[in-house]
Image: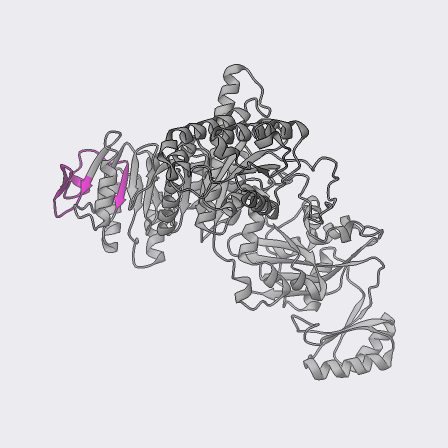
Amino acid sequence: MSLDALFDPRSVAVVGASANPAKWGYWLAAGALAGRSRRTVHLVNQRGGHLDGVPFLPDLGSLATAPEQIVVAVPPRQVRPVVVEGLAAGARCFTVITSGGAGPEEERELASLVTSHGGRLLGPNCMGVVDTTTELRLSWGDFPAGAVGLVSQSGNLALEIGRLLARAGQGFSRFVSLGNQRDIDAADALDALIAHDATRVVAAYVEDFRDGRRLARTLAAAHAAGKPVLLLTLGRSEASGRAAASHTGALVSARAVVDAVCRDTGAILLESAGELVDTAVLLTAARHGQRQRQAQGQRQGQGQGQGQGQGPCLGRGRAAPGAAAGEASASGEAPASPEAPRIAVVGDSGGQGALAADALTARGLHVPVLDEATRAAVAAHLPGRGGCGNPVDLAGAGEADLRNYARITRALLDGGDTDATVLTGYFGDYATANPDQTREECEVAEELARAARKAGRLLVVHTMARDTPALAVLREHGVPVYERIEQAATALAHAARPAPATPYAPPGRVPPPSRPVADGGYESVRTLLRSHGLDFPTAEFVTTADEAADAARRTGYPLALKAMGLAHKTEAGGVALGIADETALRAAFARMRDTTGAARYAVEEMAVHPHSVELIAGVRYDPAFGPVAMVGLGGVTAELLADTALALAPLTPGRARELLLSLRHAPLLTGWRGAPAVDLDAAADALCALARAACEHPELTELEVNPLLVHPGGAVALDAHGVLT
């Protein structure tokens, strides 16, 4: 259902309006009145009063016509009566600032009441809604106008983001405070921002993802629409703060799941409000310039290539001239990815330029050697017309003539051998020491912005100055300005994050549950997974040493002995491998029984395959996103290596292969130092079977195979474990 009545109502009523600036009702009423040239505004307070010449009406029944949106800022016990009265009057959109009742159930009933009448409810317990493009300000605090749309479950965090945006010369197009999300949730609000032309960058702080798979589809839709989504959430410390019943539980934290969903959908997961604002400012500038250039190109009948209709953007780079992809440099520095954007650096201090290059390189960006033509164009403006590298050291050229900042930066932007330019150092601060230079410095700032706009490439400025006239000019023209070089480098790195390898394809439908398994032990889980096609070594399950000896004669030596009922068998002394004969078997059995106290054991043939690699594969049920599949380097070092890849389950064979090849240690699978490649198809099929089994058995909150031995001839599961709900 459209949210037009939320963002641009024809009329609005504030119930609980106040003339006291210390109360929420005042801010809501004052904000509503600020938009009365666009809509009818009613203020309701049963005690009477007035604000800015507008009288407070005693109740909604006193209104001549039904308001399209009602903002409810009354004590919790009065919320439901106000909503009932509003529905009877014909209102269909409610923003509930206070809590909607004594508990969650009452709030859900309130939302159900509204939706059953064809309406929508924002909140309860929210901070309101703002749309600076429609003069709608129904919230506490100040919200600067700009191009960033924000959805947030934290009101104070939204205020912090707003202040940081204002300092950077940017602001909000829309702001939605989600509150308790009893009806309108994060996906609803994000959908509205994606469709909003004035919103160039979408930001969100979400604690409760609700239907995570629906939200993933929304994030993918934003990426397809060209709207970058910047996401903040909680959970970075969860994995270290709890004991896990399996390796999968330790490796698949809630944060890791969100990270995987963002990777697959093109969203950018960030860590702080400051990082979000830094990245938003850069992306907003890039998208604004892109629109300008596209419009200019359409007017002139130009194409959409670089410099012809495409605005400042961080394009994908190429390897340094003469260097093969993955080849180390002579200095031993790890090379940037061939796909990393190429950044030119120019500074009026050799030290600052070098540190800028280091900061960019450390974040995966490429600071290449400049082409000969670009070097010559830059050198023409340097003292002594000497040579230059990257970073470019102005070596006093700026002090000699402020316009050299623009000339040299223009040469770098026009060179075509880099995707963006970083100007670092002192520019913007000359007028502080010498006010007579204010006009010229502002003119140079104008020239810098024009040069970036004409070149169709991104210019980023790092400066030790703060809030000077020249910096104001840069910001007015959409040039991102940062106080610290690490801010600029981090924002560039986030903006340059690779797009998903393939367009997001929602995972297949989760199949209906099958008959529950009895327990999560190896014997039961092994039976389950074999029924789904996973290969296991031959095994028999026994309770005594004599039974073990009899089973061994059928299985054959060498063999493995495993104690049942243990989540982490190796750590508990519950695994013995390579047992060569009956004497060794009986000794291992006695030792294992004394150590673990297990009542049941597996006697299993040893699986020995040359050129094999141990993987860990698992599925964990996430409360928001459902079953999540994981694969990584396995065995006893699984948590130590923490080389894993995640995706929502179930999986397709193609998606499973992508996960395998995305691992840092993937070369071990494809043939390392002359070894043959493992059977990736068999490994992918094993992952698909495991994911399918987990989806059919939601009673298993965790399901794991560790190790999954993959080799040139196939894949075999050597151990398995499940955790029942």
Looking at the image, residue 134 sits to the left or right of residue 627; the answer is left
Please state which of residues 554 and 235 is positioned toward the viewer in this rendering: 235
Looking at the image, residue 503 sits to the left or right of residue 319; the answer is left
- Image location (x, y in percent) of residue 496: 57, 40
Q: Is residue 70 magenta?
A: yes
Question: What residue is shown at x 45% (from left), y 53% (from top)?
Answer: 208
Residue 253: quadrant of the picture? bottom right
Please state which of residues 431 and 335 is positioned toward the viewer in this rendering: 431
Residue 223: quadrant of the picture? top right
Q: Quadrant of the C terminus?
A: bottom right
Q: How is the image coloured?
A: one colour
- Taking 457 as reference, is 84 above or below it? below
Residue 251: quadrant of the picture? bottom right
Question: What residue is shown at x 62% (from left), y 66% (from top)?
Answer: 246
Q: Which portion, as a residue range, is magenta?
A: 43-72
The reply to whether residue 95 is visible in this rendering is yes
Looking at the image, residue 48 sits to the left or right of residue 401; the answer is left
Q: Is residue 472 magenta?
A: no
- Image location (x, y in percent) of residue 129: 33, 42
- Taking 705 as reference, is 692 above or below it? above
Looking at the image, residue 674 sits to the left or right of residue 254; the answer is right
